[in-house]
Structure formats: structure tokens, C-alpha cells
């Protein structure tokens, strides 16, 4: 599979914008139709039942390309994504579980890795779980040492989303909706969120986020899939070769809160401007790597969001030949090398997920932006619509 041409990318971006319009039109569509009414390319199934009795549906999506995936209403989690290697052999390349129990188990909750989930209201950390907006100070849960992480005690990753499957000329997918009540997890304003997953005919997963609020509030939405291009459960990702289109990154303090500086990657283990194996420098003597226990840092793609998605990163696996390219409108990319994975949970193929056995590329605004005046703003105002687009494209190389 060859690289997308500039022309096809322009098309892709235009397609994404029209998908956004379709998404707005779909807003009044009925929720969760019965499986008989499924659009082409989407199959509904029951993934499990929550302790309170609510059923969690899943959707198997295929678009006639080489990739197929499953997503569930709980957490908007991508539970499976199968892509071919250079010989056409398919493998599931995202970490996760075959059943809801996996995502609800005490061992999983203790580790809290957010496998495959939608993250909100605020992806990444807010220092001391506190911010001041229009003269008022808000205190959020501190669920990561002294800080607030990924939306708090019960973030969007643990919510039951309302799913509307669809198919369009670009492919098939599901629109996920969730309304977060005013005051949920301490955040101001009722926040209505839509996330549209589209698997296109050319092996692209487009993720279109939109949100509206009733009061000014910080929002930073992302997706927390862990990829292993050799197949989930197959071991470490340290052999994967990474390129990140970022000349700088945001160094962190001991609790992984940005210091506020924007530092060049040049001459550091954070320089992925040329393709470099992840393992090449991950153990280098570097204070930032010590703090992150590896890579767990926000890379600066741009100083403001971009109107259409731009290339952000490329990961290749020399072993399997699988390639993942990421485009986004977001200004930041958290590259997390799975440093907290410790073998304490066992994934869908029966293999324990060990240290660095998956990597996340979380497109986002910068961490702790509500407290950092030098970072692009994450405050959404009533009357505005937050729009954010990320594209993951799966291909192979020889
Ligand atoms: C993000 C954070 C990491 C870690 C993971 C989940 O990537 O930056 O520090 O919390 O989520 O384990």
C-alpha cells in the first residue's frame, strides 16, 4: 500500500469537513438501532452488561478495505483493530479485551491504562486538579498523585456513550454521543460531546470530535488506543521506528506537569524528526526520560490548532512491515511508550501486557493548559463549537 498523495490528503480533509456536516445532521438520529437496521459495513453485537444492568453494544466496522475494527459504547473504546502485515496476514494491533469484564476488572482499574478509550473532559494532566476561570477557582479530582488526569475519577472512558452507526460515501462508522452534566467531575457547564469514528475505504480511521458547552470550560478530547504493530500481546514496541513532526516538546516536572518551557528536541532523545527506533535512546541518561519513566511527553506540532489535519507522526515496524501514520488538527501529540504496563493484565489473546508492549499517540492540546498562559487555550465558550480532527492511516512497507 503506497503513501497517500497530497491530492488524496486534500480530499481526505475535505471529506472530513463534510463528515462534520453529516455529523451535525445526524444529531437528531435515533439512538442504537436494532441490528436489523444496521447500515452497510456495520454489525452490532452485545459486548456485555454493566453492573447496573445497562447493556453495552459493540459495532464491528469494515469498509471494504484491508482494515476492520470494533468499538463499544462503554468508553467509546476501540476494542479491536485488525490490519494486514506486509504479507497480507492480519493481526489485531490494539491492546484490549474480548469482554466487558476485562475493562471492569479490579486489576485493570488498578493499573488504569485507558486502553482504546475516548478521554475527557480533559485529556492529560491539570496541576493539583485546579484552575481558575473568569475569577472562579475550580477543584477537580486528583486521581494521579497530586494531579488531575484524563477527566478524573470517572472520565469519559467509563461512560456509556450513545452510538449511532452510519455509512457514507467515505466508509462506515459510528457516531458516539455523551452529555456531561454541569458540575460533572467538578467541571463547569453542561458539555455535549460527539465523536465520529469513520473507517474509510482506504484504511483510514478518521476521528472527528465536536463539543458544545453551556458555560466556559476547559476541554481537551483525545483517543487512548495503544498500538503494537507486531500484534497485541506480541511483546515490546521498542523495535518500532518512530517519526514525529515536532521540533520541540514540553518538558515536565517530577509529577509530569509541563514546566511551561517549550524546548527544542535537537540533540536530545526527544528528536524523532528522523525515523528512529523507540528503544534507541529510551534508556539514555536524561532527566526528562527519568521523569516520564520513558517517553510520556507532549510534542509540539504547532502553536495553534490547524484548520485541516496535518501529518504528525509515523510509526513503522521493521518486523511486520505495518505502518501507522497520524494526521491531526491538534497542536500537540502525547507520545506515551507504555511505561506503566507491567504484566498485571492479560489481553484478548491470553498474553500478559508487559512493560512497553503498546504505545499511544494521543493528539491533544498541551497538558495543564488551563494553568499555562503560554499554551494554546483549551477554554470552550458557550455558543462556540469545538472541532477537532485526527486521522490514523494503516498501510505497509517492504
Ligand atoms: C497518558 C499519561 C500517562 C499514563 C497513561 C495511562 O498517556 O500521560 O502518564 O497515565 O495515560 O496509563
Image: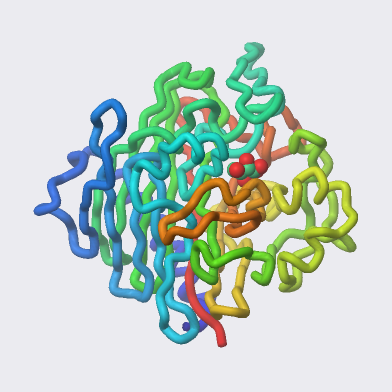
Q: Name the foreground residue: 266 vs 98.
A: 98
Is the residue 74 above or below the residue 94 in the image? above
**Residue positioned 65% across, 70% down in the render:** 240
Instruction: Please state the horizontal and vertical placement of residue 241, each as a whole percent of the image.
Output: 67, 71
Instruction: Please state the horizontal and vertical placement of residue 279, each as a whole percent of the image.
Output: 74, 66
Question: Which quarter of the figure has residue 372?
Answer: top right
Q: Name the foreground residue: 26 vs 285.
A: 285
Is the residue 118 above or below the residue 184 in the image? below
Is the residue 304 above or below the residue 245 in the image? above
Instruction: Please state the horizontal and vertical placement of residue 183, each as a whole percent of the image.
Output: 47, 16
Question: Which quarter of the figure has residue 280?
Answer: bottom right
**Residue positioned 82% across, 60% down in the render:** 269
Quadrant in which ligand 1 is drawn: top right
Q: Is residue 51 left or right of residue 355?
A: left
Residue 365 can be seen, yes or no: no
Task: Check the image and tell me how it is coloured.
Answer: rainbow
**Residue positioned 41% across, 51% down in the render:** 97
Q: Name the foreground residue: 42 vs 219.
A: 42
Instruction: Please state the horizontal and vertical placement of residue 211, each as a whole percent of the image.
Output: 44, 36
Q: Name the foreground residue: 165 vs 91.
A: 91
Residue 104 can be seen, yes or no: yes
Q: State the quadrant of the C terminus.
A: bottom right
Q: Is residue 56 left or right of residue 79?
A: left
- Number of numbered discs on residues: 0
**Residue positioned 39% across, 59% down in the render:** 80
Seen as rendered, the residue at the extreme top is 136
Q: Is residue 363 left or right of residue 161?
A: right
Amino acid at each position: 500500500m503506497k503513501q497517500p498523495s497530497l491530492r488524496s490528503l486534500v480530499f481526505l480533509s475535505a471529506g472530513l469537513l463534510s463528515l462534520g456536516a453529516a455529523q451535525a445532521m445526524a444529531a437528531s438520529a435515533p439512538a442504537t438501532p436494532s441490528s436489523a437496521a444496521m447500515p452497510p459495513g456495520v454489525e452490532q453485537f452485545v459486548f456485555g452488561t454493566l453492573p447496573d444492568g445497562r447493556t453495552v453494544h459493540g459495532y464491528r466496522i469494515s469498509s471494504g478495505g484491508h482494515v476492520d475494527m470494533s468499538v463499544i459504547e462503554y468508553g467509546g473504546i476501540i476494542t479491536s483493530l485488525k490490519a494486514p502485515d506486509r504479507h497480507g496476514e492480519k493481526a489485531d494491533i490494539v491492546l484490549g479485551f474480548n469482554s466487558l469484564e476485562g475493562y471492569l476488572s479490579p486489576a485493570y482499574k488498578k493499573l488504569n491504562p485507558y486502553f482504546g478509550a475516548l478521554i475527557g473532559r480533559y485529556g492529560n494532566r491539570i496541576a493539583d486538579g485546579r484552575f481558575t476561570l473568569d475569577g472562579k477557582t475550580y477543584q477537580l479530582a486528583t486521581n494521579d498523585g497530586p494531579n488531575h488526569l484524563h477527566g478524573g475519577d470517572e472520565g469519559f472512558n467509563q461512560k456509556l456513550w450513545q452510538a449511532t452507526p452510519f455509512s457514507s460515501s467515505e466508509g462506515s462508522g459510528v457516531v458516539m454521543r455523551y452529555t456531561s452534566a454541569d458540575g460533572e467531575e467538578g467541571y463547569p457547564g453542561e458539555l455535549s460531546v460527539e465523536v465520529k469514528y469513520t473507517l474509510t475505504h482506504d484504511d483510514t480511521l478518521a476521528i472527528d470530535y465536536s463539543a458544545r458547552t453551556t458555560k466556559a470550560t476547559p476541554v481537551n478530547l483525545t483517543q487512548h488506543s495503544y498500538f503494537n504493530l507486531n500484534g497485541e500481546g506480541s511483546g515490546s514496541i521498542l523495535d518500532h521506528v518512530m517519526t514525529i513532526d515536532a521540533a520541540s516538546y514540553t518538558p515536565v516536572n517530577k509529577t509530569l506537569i509541563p514546566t511551561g518551557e517549550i524546548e527544542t528536541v535537537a540533540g536530545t532523545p526527544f528528536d524523532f524528526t528522523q525515523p528512529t527506533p523507540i528503544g534507541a535512546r529510551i534508556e539514555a541518561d536524561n532527566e526528562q526520560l527519568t521523569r516520564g519513566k520513558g517517553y510520556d511527553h507532549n510534542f509540539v506540532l504547532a502553536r495553534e490548532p490547524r484548520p485541516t489535519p496535518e501529518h504528525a507522526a509515523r510509526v513503522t515496524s521493521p518486523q511486520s512491515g505495518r505502518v501507522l501514520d497520524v494526521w491531526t488538527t491538534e497542536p500537540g501529540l502525547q507520545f506515551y511508550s507504555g511505561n506503566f504496563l507491567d504484566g498485571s493484565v492479560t489481553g484478548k489473546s491470553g498474553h500478559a501486557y508487559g512493560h512497553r508492549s503498546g504505545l499511544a499517540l494521543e493528539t491533544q492540546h498541551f497538558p495543564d493548559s488551563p494553568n499555562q498562559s503560554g499554551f494554546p487555550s483549551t477554554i470552550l465558550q458557550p455558543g462556540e463549537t469545538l472541532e477537532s480532527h485526527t486521522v490514523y492511516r494503516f498501510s505497509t512497507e517492504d
